[in-house]
């Protein structure tokens, strides 16, 4: 072991050997399907993929929650096998795609307003104008008269409102800003709707996880997250006034009520908004979330595995949703989705 | 003779082979620059030089400007320098001049450990330890009494330009410390003794000798630290607050060039968005390049002066 | 006056102890065997571990070093032994420049050059980004080490009739080999802890992964994801992951120092 060559050669051999062993299992490795996108359904998807992979050891779904914007971007660039988003793709967005894409709805969730105040309980009431006022920076303190008059039973502290929003491109933001645009003219004029907007103020968190984290860590903070995040982290949630004038707390039932009407008006491509839904018990900020898959799959094995999973997701997968406070797809919608899955093919051969 | 000829060919082969790898390194550097440049072109074409001074960052309208990020990077880095340099130089003077000799090795070792801690771990500590402490012990009281000063205006979130600056200062201390120590060590013993023998106090000796001799070197160390601070990504992302706006108050959230790339790169839909992010990367590359070049030039001058025995 | 400088020294070292203390206490709390051998659990479900991250970190680091070590060392040899002309100056300048480039930019490099054309996030892309950090550093340390060998040694070898290439390898390089190895180990410790270049190259993975052309998990990525999340359970895991990471980094650093000391 005297020469430098000797040392270099042995080191190199060791490295190559360890890598060979590591990659030697390539032949027997389960098929990996990569997806990325929305953080909104991540609590549900991470449970789905974990259980599904355990039950089907020949395939693994690796999902990275990087935000709906990321999901759309990466499926457009083709670096993932499927994308996930709660902001439906726009017409111009779809024009940039190399092929036709399907929006497969998987679940219905609710965007809830969470806050962090020591001296107040859960269930603070907000009207659309108050919520818009906070996010526009016009209402800056928790004991502002506009908030106080809606919540006469609570003592609100004289503390600054710390506004939190998403720093990344987010379907949750799209749903939330869609709501504010629908119910408040000033918001519509000044900010508008989208996965990424020019926020008038506030601090940015990355992903639903990031916003929940910021609100949890910062006294006096307010933010918007998907219901599962609020529940899992035992955060205080606000009740919002819906279209009919009732203050509704975000619950599974309220979300399902918002989704009830959607079955009739579901368009063929499933890109529909559930914001400010009619109905006495409907929660005003509900939304669908979709998985994006190309109609024309590039890889037969992956395409088949994808279709098999989606078939499972819209039937068996739905059973897991209630436990995580996501509302399942209505029966008629499931049938329509099932039909849509038949459009997925490989070189013309249907993979259903 | 035969052996020599055989040796010559092998020698040539050796030279050419190692040279090929050297060329590869050069090629990689050029490739890096080329890739950054090529991907920035769409944004350059759309926005031109105005990109540097535009304050809007609107993915919906596809209007982008780098101003808030350049501002955030510069402010957080300068804040870091402001805190780190006096502390590092003071510590260097203490270790070199006042501390007992047995202390020198352990202290250098500890400073190197600080340099070895990965950025994400600094960020982790920043989120859960530094930010809450800064918020409750410093920012909240200061806003209460001095909130009218634009630098300290509330509301206090926690994640802020100040938090980023303080965390960065901790991270660049090891670099400034080690270079300062090297610079201080180049002072000839004779000069120090001369001042002392003329009746100067220890403090006067330090002031005169160091002031005369070491300032350029310490300046070089500062610029080196600045270069590191400019490019820091993870730790800053985790404590700066992610707000794309150039705000005056140190207690407000901000954004940095490296942080916006880290947060938004994977989701930049559309060519202009991605290109704008790469252009920000190019600007960052240019900044760190210029700063590091300046640092090296100053430090090499320092070394030259020392070797000439000035 | 002395007191002020002493205070400076204390303030400078203090954060190190605070951070290490926190890592040990908060990280140690969650440091169970399951953390080291289990895969991550679904969001919100307690338990699970970062085993795939530890494996992924090793794989990506070793992959990086596989081509980076020979490239950097051989380049360093060239610069030290033949490096007098314009070409050598250009190479030196290039390496120096690259050492100062923020690591996130290497991530952009990896994404554009490998992820997009391959249409896949992968360990390859992660290693490509990391090698752009590793190579320039080791080029410089190798060259510096070789330059410490006095010219007399080289001349003596040549005078004895030893071919130049042999003299370089068997004598010059061998003399400072521990120093070169130190440089390699320090660079390895550095890329072990890098997060930014992996964010959009290796991306991350929830499962075990042995294929190099697929996304791969890594401990720094997991620490980042868990740290910015709201789940207490994940925060604990972030600290534990950070403890694992810093242990790996420190062990390699200490090994590197021991090597240099042994030489003396």
Image (spheres, coloured by chain):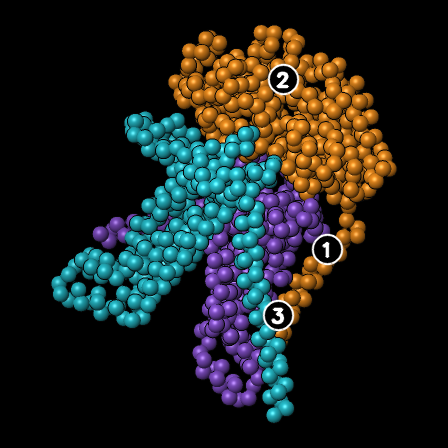
Chain colours: A orange, B cyan, C purple
Label 2 crowd (10 A; few <14 / some 14-19 / many >=20)? many
Residue A87 is situated, as x and y percent measured from the top left of the image, at 64, 27
In the picture, residue A1 is in which quadrant?
bottom right
Quadrant holding the C terminus of chain A: top right
Q: Residue furthest left?
A: B199
Residue B161 is situated, as x and y percent measured from the top left of the image, at 40, 37
Q: Chain of mark 2?
A: A
Residue in front for this viewpoint, B72 or C175:
B72
Query: Which residue position is annotated with label 3?
Result: A8
Dot 1 or dot 2, earlier in sequence: 1
Q: Is residue A7 visible?
A: yes
- A205 is higher (above) or lower (below) than B27: above
Residue at 35% across, 53% down = B222
Query: Which residue position is annotated with label 1?
Result: A23
Dot 3 or dot 2, earlier in sequence: 3
Q: Chain of mark 3?
A: A
- C262 is higher (above) or lower (below) than A153: below
Please tell me if label 1 and label 2 are on a single chain: yes
Residue at 79% across, 50% down = A28
Helix, strand or loop at mark 2: loop
Mark 3–mark 1 distance (CA, rounded to whole Å): 22 Å
Q: Chain of mark 1?
A: A
In the picture, residue B183 is in which quadrant?
bottom left
- A147 is higher (above) or lower (below) than A315: above
């Amino acid at each position: 072991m005297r020469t430098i060559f000797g040392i270099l050669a042995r080191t190199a051999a060791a490295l190559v050997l360890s890598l060979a062993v590591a990659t030697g299992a390539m032949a027997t490795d389960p098929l990996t399907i990569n997806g990325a996108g929305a953080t909104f359904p991540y609590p549900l998807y991470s449970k789905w993929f974990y259980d599904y992979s355990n039950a089907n050891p020949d395939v693994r779904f690796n999902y990275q929650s990087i935000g709906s914007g990321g999901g759309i971007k990466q499926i457009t660039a083709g670096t993932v096998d499927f994308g996930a988003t709660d902001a439906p793709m726009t017409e111009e967005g779809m024009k940039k795609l190399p092929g036709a894409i399907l929006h497969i709805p998987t679940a219905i969730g609710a965007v809830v307003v969470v806050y962090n105040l020591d001296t107040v309980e859960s269930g603070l009431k907000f009207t659309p104008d108050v919520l818009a006022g906070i996010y526009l920076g016009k209402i800056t303190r928790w004991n502002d008269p506009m908030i106080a008059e809606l919540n006469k039973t609570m003592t609100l502290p004289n503390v600054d409102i710390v506004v939190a929003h998403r720093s990344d491109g987010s379907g949750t933001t799209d749903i939330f800003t869609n709501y504010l645009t629908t119910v408040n003219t000033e918001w519509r004029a000044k900010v508008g709707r989208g996965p990424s907007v020019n926020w008038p103020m506030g601090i940015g968190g990355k992903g639903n996880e990031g916003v929940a984290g910021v609100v949890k860590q910062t006294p006096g903070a307010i933010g918007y997250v998907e219901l599962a995040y609020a529940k899992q982290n035992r955060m205080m949630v606000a009740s919002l006034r819906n279209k009919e004038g009732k203050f509704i707390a975000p619950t599974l039932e309220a979300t399902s009520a918002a989704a009830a009407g959607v079955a009739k008006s579901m368009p063929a491509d499933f890109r529909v908004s559930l914001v400010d839904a009619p109905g006495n018990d409907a929660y005003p900020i509900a939304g669908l979330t979709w998985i994006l898959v190309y109609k024309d799959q590039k890889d037969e094995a992956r395409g088949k595995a994808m279709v098999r999973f989606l078939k499972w997701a819209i039937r068996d997968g739905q059973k897991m949703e209630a436990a995580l406070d996501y509302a399942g797809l209505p029966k008629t919608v499931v049938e329509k989705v099932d039909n849509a899955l038949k459009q997925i093919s490989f070189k013309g051969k249907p993979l259903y | 003779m035969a052996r020599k000829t055989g040796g010559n060919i092998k020698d040539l082969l050796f030279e050419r082979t190692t040279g090929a790898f050297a060329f590869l390194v050069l090629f990689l550097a050029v490739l890096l620059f080329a890739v950054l440049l090529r991907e920035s072109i769409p944004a350059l074409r759309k926005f031109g030089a105005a990109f540097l001074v535009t304050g809007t960052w609107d993915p919906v309208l596809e209007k982008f400007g780098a101003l808030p990020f350049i501002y955030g990077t510069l402010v957080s880095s300068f804040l870091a320098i402001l805190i780190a340099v006096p502390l590092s130089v003071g510590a260097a003077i203490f270790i070199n001049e006042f501390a007992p000799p047995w202390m020198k090795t352990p202290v250098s070792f500890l400073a190197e450990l600080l340099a070895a801690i990965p950025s994400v771990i600094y960020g982790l500590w920043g989120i859960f330890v530094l930010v809450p402490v800064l918020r409750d012990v410093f920012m909240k009281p200061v806003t209460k009494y001095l909130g009218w000063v634009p630098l300290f205006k509330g509301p206090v979130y926690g994640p802020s330009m100040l938090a980023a600056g303080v965390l960065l200062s901790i991270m660049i201390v090891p670099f400034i410390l080690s270079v300062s120590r090297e610079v201080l060590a180049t002072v000839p013993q004779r000069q120090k003794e001369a001042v002392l023998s003329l009746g100067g106090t220890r403090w006067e000796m330090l002031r005169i000798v160091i002031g005369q001799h070491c300032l350029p070197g310490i300046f070089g160390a500062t610029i080196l630290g600045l270069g590191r601070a400019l490019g820091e990504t993870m730790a800053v992302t985790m404590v700066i607050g992610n707000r794309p706006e150039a705000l005056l108050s140190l207690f407000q959230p901000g954004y940095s060039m490296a942080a916006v790339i880290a947060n938004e790169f994977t989701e930049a839909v559309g060519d202009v968005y991605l290109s704008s992010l790469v252009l920000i990367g190019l600007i960052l590359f240019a900044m760190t390049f210029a700063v590091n070049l300046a640092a090296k030039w100053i430090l090499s001058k320092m070394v030259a002066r020392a070797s000439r025995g000035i | 006056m002395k007191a002020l400088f002493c205070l400076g020294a204390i303030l400078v070292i203090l954060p190190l102890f605070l951070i290490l203390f926190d890592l040990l206490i908060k990280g140690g709390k969650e440091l169970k065997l399951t953390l080291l051998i289990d895969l991550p659990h679904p969001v919100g479900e307690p338990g699970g571990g970062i085993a795939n991250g530890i494996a992924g970190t090793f794989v990506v680091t070793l992959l990086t070093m596989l081509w980076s070590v020979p490239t950097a060392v051989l380049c360093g040899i060239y610069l030290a032994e033949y490096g007098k002309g314009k070409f050598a100056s250009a190479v030196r300048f290039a390496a120096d420049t690259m050492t100062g480039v923020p690591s996130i930019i290497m991530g952009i490099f990896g994404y554009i050059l490998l992820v997009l054309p391959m249409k896949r996030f992968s360990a390859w892309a992660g290693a490509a980004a990391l090698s752009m950090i590793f190579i320039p550093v080791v080029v410089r340390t190798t060259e510096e080490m070789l330059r410490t060998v006095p010219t007399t040694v080289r001349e003596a070898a040549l005078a004895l009739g030893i071919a130049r290439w042999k003299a370089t390898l068997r004598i010059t390089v061998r003399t400072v080999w521990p120093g070169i190895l130190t440089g390699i180990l320090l660079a390895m410790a550095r890329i072990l802890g890098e997060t930014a270049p992996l964010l959009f190259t290796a991306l991350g993975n929830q499962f075990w992964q042995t294929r190099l052309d697929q996304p791969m998990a890594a401990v720094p990525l997991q620490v980042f994801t868990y740290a910015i999340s709201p789940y207490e359970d994940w925060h604990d895991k972030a600290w534990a992951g950070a403890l694992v990471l810093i242990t790996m980094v420190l062990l390699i650093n200490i090994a590197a120092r021991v090597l240099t000391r042994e030489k003396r």
